[in-house]
Structure formats: structure tokens, C-alpha cells
Amino acid sequence: MNFSNDDFIRTTEQRHKDAVVELWRMLEEKGHIYLGAYEGWYSVRDEAYYTESELVDGKAPTGAEVEWVVKEPSYFFKLSEWGDKLLEYYDSHPDFIGPNSRRNEVISFVKGGLRDLSISRTTFEWGINVPDQPVPTSDDDPNHIMYVWVDALTNYLSALGFPGGDKFERFWPAGVQMVGKDIIRFHAVYWPALLLAAGLEPPQRIFAHGWWTRDGQKISKSIGNVIDPTELVSTFGVDQVRYFLMAEVPFGQDGDYSETAMLATANGFLANALGNLQMRVMSLVHKNCDGQVPEPGLLNADDEAMLEAARTLHGKMAPLVACQSLNKACGEMEVVVRMANKYIDEQAPWALKKTDVPRMKTVLWTLMETLRHVAVCCLPLMPASADCMLDQLAVKSEHRTFSSLALAEAMVMAGTPVVKPAGLFPRIELEETLTADTSSAEGAGSAADGEAAKEADPEMVEALRVEIAAAAEAVKAAKSGGADKGTIQPLVDALLALKAEFLELTGTPFDPPKTKKKKKKKKEEVA
């Protein structure tokens, strides 16, 4: 997926053990830990305790099995004292928990009352020993091991060298901690309470992401509909998968994967809108501007409007990314790309090369500058493809940053040589459906077997109709403007690709087949 980690830590490492012991001692010194006894329902899978009222049909709220833990000695954290303090913290830090649905869930849980949290066990030996506990005098004296969440959550601190060090001073409190929605309680209730009790700042934000389903069903080995991510990337491409995951659904909600939706992203926006735009622009520049960035002339209102949209793109995307609205950020970028496609179709630089070469160069420069802004804003989303775009635009490596977007010296410079363009997003043609992982579902068929074909999303169909109409107009304008075959053919290919996508999405051709009228046979004259 083309991402990497800054550090890899095991909770068995000594640096982690040292951090956990230090946090325990800080809590103990401030009077937040005491020795008592525990009994109640416990879920091994969730590594969590549940009250009788939380059980649903005898199971944990997550559906996990629970077991009754007989009364045993345990150290407790005085979580019950932190209910009102946490509610005050949530109120004074409204962005601490996201999305809002999870924030409301957490607040409701805390308002229901908090019990002191058991933070040690005596029934197993693996884990980190509770520090400074009395030395056992007999085999009957228990040895306390820290409860898993006190151990595991401290991992966020130990990776930064807690209780000191340059990394901890520089990076704590963390900006955003991303967690699964099923463990939001531990991160948004237990974690900030432990930190505040120890005199440490909580993270600035806890954000819970949702789960993916496939064709409306939960992804599960027992169902047999698991998608191999390696195969997914091999089929569609790394950046296509990255973009789909960020653009398809509101981040924080559950999202549904289907090959129809994946193809619509890969072949629709990425190949037809963005990739085709880059190819059209750079092909015209390479062929008609001596393989150099063209010299722009006086900009008119259309040019200024196009550039204004490009130059304000980062300012619109940044706050959306900051609050994890990734799909909306992608949407802002798509607006600019579609505007650029409309701009090139209306300006028709392939026709201008015969009537007004200076104007053609201005249009192409405007488009190159627009693509520079789009590519830089795409770097976190699709790093490899964005770099390829910037290579073709001849943008220097030191100017591929957000801070360089507004610099005059970072703009595409007239006279700079450009390379012959290459395609960014090849069109995906699937010969068969991706095979689901059925290793744990012997004899299970595809989740979609026997299902009736779903109706296409009306909004998606309408958007595709608009794109096809625009592409058809571009072909018509190029032909009427006397463009050569090298200019017209990419436009025709794009139009055909869109029509193929329409057929794939709806099951019906965009152009209904023409039926030949049968000639009426003349009645034979009766002799």
C-alpha cells in the first residue's frame, strides 16, 4: 500500500516495560490505585469486563462469549471518580472524539456511571508484574500481573521514549490516534482517565474508523467473502485502491466494497477524468510546444477562474483532512479536475493551434499549472501517481510540498523541457470476479451467488451520462476544428471507455442498438 512505519515496538521490549511501570507508579503515588477483589463477567476476546446489564442474550455487546470470574484479588484504578471530570473534558474539548456518533456513544456510556477498573490479574503469569507489590511468603500469595489495557495503551507512550526523551517532548500529546470503532471505549474513556490521573495530557483527538462490508455483507471467513488485499492491489493498482478506500465512504462510517464501485473509481474518475486529462494536456504540449512548457500570454476570465479553483484547492482540502473527512477532501479535488476537463473541452487547444497559437499556449500553460496544484494535493492520497504527474509537469522535487504551492518560483516555468507523457491509470478490464478467500469456509460459494443483479445508483448513472455527453462534445469540437488524428484518437478512446463503463454499470448500452426495419414483402399477385 506504499506506506511505512517510523518505529516497530513489541510490548515485551524492556523500553515498554519501563514505561508501563513508570505510569503505574505515577498513578499509585497520586492515590489512584488500591488493592481489592474482583468478580464478574469477563470476555477473553474483548479483553474487557462487562456488567450484568451490558450483556445481550448472555453475551458481550460485541457478541463475544463471556465467562464468570470468581472472586480474586485485584488492583483497581479509581475510574468511578472520573465520570464528571471526563464529561467536563469532553465538553471543553468538543473535537476530542470523532466522529460525532462515537462521541455520543462514549458520553452516553460515561453518563451511565463508571465503576472502578480492575487493572491486575492473578490467574496467569505472562505480562508485566505489578511493581512494588509485597514479596510472596508462600505459594498461596498471589502475584499480580498488569491488566492488558493498562499495559497495551501505554504502548503509545513507550514508543516515544516515555518518561523522557526528545521524541516524547516533541510528539506528545499525539495529534490523532486512529482506532477501530469496537475499542473506542478503552481509548476514549479509560485512556484519558489514566493519563489525566497521572498528570499527563491525553491525545488531542481519538477517531474511530468503521468496518468494511462486501456487497452488503459483513466480511468474514465463515461466509467466504474475504478479499485478499494483495490480489486486490495486483488487480487494480496500489494508488487506485488507496484512493477508493479514502474517497468511497465518509471516514468513520462502515463502507461497502464491491467490484462495481471499485471499477467506477479506477476507470471512471481516475482513468477517464484525471488520467485522461493529464494525457491530453501533456500530449498537446509535447507535440505542439516543442516539448517545452509553453509561454503563457495575457490571461482572460476563463483562465483566471480555472487557476483560482486550482490555487484554492489545498485550502479547501486541508481542514477536511484535519477532521478526517477524507471523502469530502477527495470530492474537492474531483471538482477541480472535472472543471479542468470542461475548460479544455471549451477552449479546444487542438483547434487553436491552427488559428491562435499564442492563445493555445496560454490554455495549455493554465492547464499545466492547474495539474501542478492537483498533483501536489494528491501526494498524500496517491504518492506514486502524483509523483509521476509532477515528473511529467517538470516540477522540481523541492517544490513538491504544500508550502511551495503559492511560490512563484514553483509554478510551471516556460521553456522547461517536458518528457513524452505516459498513462497514469490504465483502464482495468476484469476477466472474472476476484476470488474470495474461502480457506475457512469449505464448500462456501461466492457471497453474490444466486443474488439478483443490483440496480445501479441513479446519481452515478446520471453523472456518467454527463461525462459521456461532455466527451462526445469534445470529439465533435475536435473534428469540426480540423484536429489531426493524433489529437482526436485519445478523445474517441475516452468516449468509448465511458460508454463501456456505462454498459458495465447499468447492463445496457448507452447507444441502444439500431434495429433494421424489415422490408415488407410484396404480396404475390394472383394470376
Image (cartoon, grey):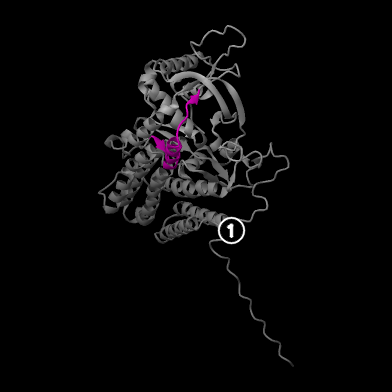
The quarter of the rendered structure image containing the C terminus is: bottom right
Q: Residues within 10 Å of mark 1 (few under 14, many from 20)?
A: few
Give x and y (percent) for residue 513: 58, 66
Q: Nearer the viewer, residue 47 or 156?
A: 47
- Asked whether residue 10 appears in the rendered view, the answer is no
Look at mark 1 in the image and give the residue it sits on: 507
Relative to 217, does residue 188 appear above or below in the rendering? Answer: above
Give x and y (percent) for residue 226: 62, 40
The disc labelled 1 sits on which kind of residue?
Gly
Q: Which residues are magenta?
A: 96-118
Give x and y (percent) for residue 69: 60, 26
Q: Nearer the viewer, residue 369 or 34?
A: 34
For the view shown, which residue lies furthest in the left direction? 298
Q: Nearer the viewer, residue 323 or 34?
A: 34
Relative to 481, does residue 96 appear above or below in the rendering? Answer: above
Give x and y (percent) for residue 270: 47, 46
Kindly indicate the quadrant of the structure image that contains residue 70: top right
Q: Residue 3 vs residue 513: left or right?
A: left
Residue positioned 49% across, 50% down in the render: 268
